[in-house]
Image (spheres, helix red, strand yellow):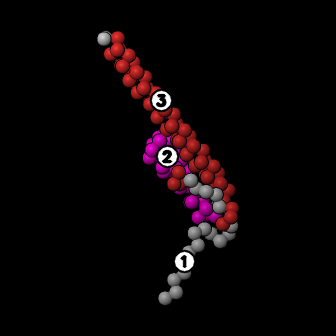
Amino acid sequence: MDAQLNPPYPENVPSAGVPDNYLAAAILTCMFCCMPLGVVSVAYAVSVNSAISMGNLQAAQIASKKAKFWMLVTLFSGLAFWVCYMLAIATMTASGVMANLENY
């Protein structure tokens, strides 16, 4: 039996011009940084593959740029949240230690 594999992209789309979908990065930032913004990034990343499979390279490039933008927004907002959280914990810890020192 001769099994022929389907090409991952339509034949009219050159493989060198296929944009990156950023799906792995979008999923990781969605899980570890900021869920609401990460969902937007994942949605655009999935739409890149859909546009490529339909042969619409221009829509795939636009979706790729949006996926990258939202992935970076998710990453930096998550990092900003964790930095602020750690600063708040450090501030509360330091003020608690200083208050206990004044009692002695």
> Which residue is located at x 51 percent, y 37 percent?
79
The residue that label 1 is drawn on is 5
Mark found first going from the N terminus, 2 or 3? 2
The nearer-to-camera label among 2 and 3 is 3
State the image coordinates of residue 15 (x, y, percent, origin top left). Answer: 66, 66
Instruction: Say if residue 73 shows up in the picture.
Output: yes
37 inside magenta stretch: yes
Callout 1: few (<14), some (14-19), or many (20+) C-alpha neighbours within 10 Å?
A: few
Q: Residue lying farthest bottom? A: 1
State the image coordinates of residue 78 (x, y, percent, origin top left). Answer: 49, 38
Q: Which residues are magenta?
A: 26-55
- Left-right relation of 70 to 101: right
Q: Residue lying farthest left? A: 104
- Does residue 3 sit above or below 77 in this rendering? below
The nearer-to-camera label among 1 and 2 is 2
The residue that label 3 is drawn on is 84
- Does residue 51 sit above or below 3 in this rendering? above
Q: Are marks 1 and 2 in contact (CB under 8 Å)?
A: no
Q: Which of 27/40 is in front?
A: 27
State the image coordinates of residue 103 (x, y, percent, origin top left). Answer: 31, 11
- Does residue 100 sit above or below 65 in this rendering? above
Q: What element does badge 2 sit on?
A: helix
Q: Amino acid at mark 2?
A: Thr
> Which residue is located at x 65 percent, y 71 percent?
11
The residue that label 2 is drawn on is 29
Mark found first going from the N terminus, 1 or 2? 1
**Which secondary structure is most common in the magenta stretch?**
helix
Callout 3: few (<14), some (14-19), or many (20+) C-alpha neighbours within 10 Å?
A: few
